[in-house]
Image: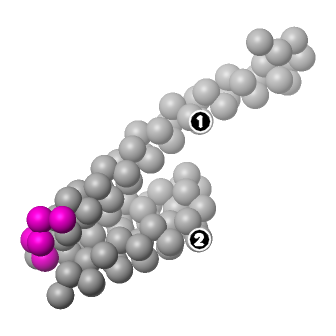
Amino acid sequence: MPNIKSSIRSVKTDAERRAKNAPIKAGVRNAARKVDASVANNAKEEAQANLVAASGLIDKAARKGIVHKNAASRKKSRLAKKVNAMA
């Protein structure tokens, strides 16, 4: 534990921020896993539906500043690439 007052406060706010961001990041990862699973099962329509849902979650995380906008774009691009390669 830090001794400096501002450092003590920052430890507390870091923990609060981490607790708030963790479920959103987990939701993005789970959505990406659903897309990957659909691609693995060759379920094209399901994969496209999951891609739309995942893209929405990724965009929302980027808007809230939880994921950097370029990282969000990269994640969406990689998922779309997998879905489009199914054809």
Image colouring? one colour
Image quadrant where residue 70 sits: bottom right
- Asked if the stretch drawn in magenta spans residue 43, the answer is yes
Q: Main secondary structure of the magenta part?
A: loop
Which amino acid type corresponds to the residue marked 2 in the rendered image? Asn
Q: Secondary structure at mark 1?
A: helix
Residue at 31% across, 50% down:
30
Label disc, if present, on residue 6 of the rendered structure? none
The extreme front residue here reads 40
Query: How many dots with numbers?
Result: 2
Identify the image quadrant of the N terminus.
Answer: top right
Q: Position of residue 54 (x, y in %)?
A: 32, 63
Which amino acid type corresponds to the residue marked 1 in the rendered image? Arg
Image quadrant where residue 45 sits: bottom left
Q: Is residue 54 above or below residue 25?
A: below
Q: Position of residue 20 (x, y in %)?
A: 50, 36
Q: Which residues are magenta?
A: 40-44
Q: Secondary structure at mark 2?
A: helix
Q: Position of residue 60 (x, y in %)?
A: 44, 60
Residue 47 lies left or right of residue 64; in this view the side is left
Label disc, if present, on residue 17 of the rendered structure? 1
Residue 17 lies left or right of residue 28; in this view the side is right
Q: Is residue 27 above or below residue 67?
A: above
